[in-house]
Image (cartoon, rainbow, N blue to C red):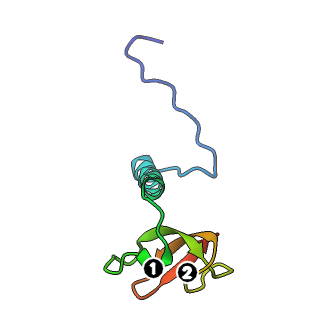
Amino acid sequence: MSAHSPPAMTRVAPEQPPGNWAGWLRDIARSVNQLIGLTDRPPYTFATLPVNVTPGTMAYITDGSVAGWGGNAAGGGTTRQLLWFNGTVWRVLGT
Protein backbone atom coordinates (compact mmCIF):
# COMPACT_ATOMS: atom_id res chain seq x y z
CA MET A 1 0.00 0.00 0.00
CA SER A 2 1.50 3.33 -1.00
CA ALA A 3 1.57 6.47 1.13
CA HIS A 4 -1.15 7.96 -1.06
CA SER A 5 -3.59 5.07 -0.93
CA PRO A 6 -7.00 5.84 0.58
CA PRO A 7 -7.61 4.37 4.01
CA ALA A 8 -9.51 1.12 4.20
CA MET A 9 -13.26 1.61 4.44
CA THR A 10 -14.97 0.62 7.64
CA ARG A 11 -17.84 -1.81 7.25
CA VAL A 12 -21.26 -0.58 8.34
CA ALA A 13 -23.58 -2.90 10.22
CA PRO A 14 -27.11 -3.23 8.74
CA GLU A 15 -28.70 -1.48 11.72
CA GLN A 16 -26.49 1.58 11.21
CA PRO A 17 -27.45 4.29 8.74
CA PRO A 18 -25.67 3.48 5.46
CA GLY A 19 -25.71 7.04 4.18
CA ASN A 20 -25.83 10.60 5.41
CA TRP A 21 -23.54 10.05 8.37
CA ALA A 22 -23.19 13.80 8.88
CA GLY A 23 -26.94 14.23 9.31
CA TRP A 24 -27.12 11.21 11.61
CA LEU A 25 -24.32 12.61 13.80
CA ARG A 26 -25.98 16.05 13.88
CA ASP A 27 -29.20 14.42 15.12
CA ILE A 28 -27.30 12.62 17.87
CA ALA A 29 -25.51 15.82 18.88
CA ARG A 30 -28.81 17.73 18.96
CA SER A 31 -30.37 15.08 21.22
CA VAL A 32 -27.38 15.06 23.56
CA ASN A 33 -27.46 18.86 23.78
CA GLN A 34 -31.18 18.77 24.65
CA LEU A 35 -30.53 16.27 27.43
CA ILE A 36 -27.64 18.35 28.76
CA GLY A 37 -29.87 21.42 28.65
CA LEU A 38 -32.42 19.64 30.84
CA THR A 39 -29.82 18.71 33.43
CA ASP A 40 -28.41 22.24 33.51
CA ARG A 41 -31.77 23.80 34.35
CA PRO A 42 -32.99 24.09 37.90
CA PRO A 43 -36.07 22.01 38.66
CA TYR A 44 -39.42 23.76 38.88
CA THR A 45 -42.50 23.20 40.95
CA PHE A 46 -45.69 22.92 38.93
CA ALA A 47 -46.74 26.42 40.03
CA THR A 48 -43.47 27.96 38.81
CA LEU A 49 -43.46 26.41 35.31
CA PRO A 50 -42.98 29.00 32.57
CA VAL A 51 -46.17 29.92 30.72
CA ASN A 52 -45.04 31.57 27.48
CA VAL A 53 -42.93 28.78 26.03
CA THR A 54 -42.57 27.16 22.64
CA PRO A 55 -44.41 23.90 22.04
CA GLY A 56 -41.96 21.05 22.51
CA THR A 57 -40.25 22.66 25.51
CA MET A 58 -39.35 20.23 28.28
CA ALA A 59 -39.09 20.93 32.00
CA TYR A 60 -38.49 19.02 35.20
CA ILE A 61 -40.71 19.39 38.29
CA THR A 62 -40.29 18.11 41.83
CA ASP A 63 -43.92 18.15 42.98
CA GLY A 64 -45.74 16.07 40.38
CA SER A 65 -48.95 14.30 41.38
CA VAL A 66 -50.07 12.60 38.15
CA ALA A 67 -49.42 8.88 37.82
CA GLY A 68 -48.73 7.60 34.36
CA TRP A 69 -47.24 8.76 31.13
CA GLY A 70 -48.99 11.28 28.90
CA GLY A 71 -51.40 12.77 31.42
CA ASN A 72 -51.81 16.47 32.04
CA ALA A 73 -49.25 17.47 34.66
CA ALA A 74 -50.34 18.71 38.07
CA GLY A 75 -48.55 19.76 41.23
CA GLY A 76 -49.15 19.08 44.88
CA GLY A 77 -47.37 15.75 45.06
CA THR A 78 -43.84 14.58 45.77
CA THR A 79 -42.97 12.87 42.47
CA ARG A 80 -40.15 14.16 40.29
CA GLN A 81 -41.35 14.29 36.68
CA LEU A 82 -40.13 15.21 33.24
CA LEU A 83 -42.72 17.28 31.38
CA TRP A 84 -43.33 18.33 27.79
CA PHE A 85 -45.35 21.38 26.69
CA ASN A 86 -47.64 20.54 23.76
CA GLY A 87 -48.65 24.13 23.04
CA THR A 88 -51.63 24.06 25.39
CA VAL A 89 -50.75 22.07 28.54
CA TRP A 90 -47.75 20.43 30.19
CA ARG A 91 -47.79 16.62 29.75
CA VAL A 92 -45.94 13.99 31.80
CA LEU A 93 -43.11 12.32 29.86
CA GLY A 94 -41.60 10.34 32.67
CA THR A 95 -41.48 9.81 36.39
Query: Residue 9, relative to residue 34: is it above or below?
Result: above
Q: What element carries label 1?
A: helix
Amino acid type at mark 2? Gly
Question: Sequence order check: which comes first, mark 2 or mark 1?
Answer: 1
Which of the image's four quarters has the C terminus? bottom right
- Furthest toward the left, the residue is 52
Q: Position of residue 51 (x, y in %)?
A: 35, 81
Residue 65 position by quadrant: bottom right
The residue sitting at 57% across, 73% down in the picture is 63
Query: Residue 59, relative to residue 12: is it above or below?
Result: below
The residue sitting at 64% across, 72% down in the picture is 78
- Give the residue number, with chain letter if any, for mark 1: 47
- Give the residue number, with chain letter if any, for mark 2: 75
Q: Position of residue 94 (x, y in %)?
A: 62, 70
CA distance for labels 2 and 1: 7 Å
Image position of 55 (left or right of 45):
left
Residue 67 position by quadrant: bottom right
Image position of 89 (left or right of 51):
right
The residue sitting at 47% across, 51% down in the picture is 32
Query: Residue 57, relative to residue 41: is it above or below?
Result: below
Q: Position of residue 84 (x, y in %)?
A: 48, 75
Q: Circles 2 and 1: CB distance less than 8 Å? A: yes
Amino acid type at mark 1? Ala
The residue sitting at 42% across, 75% down in the picture is 49
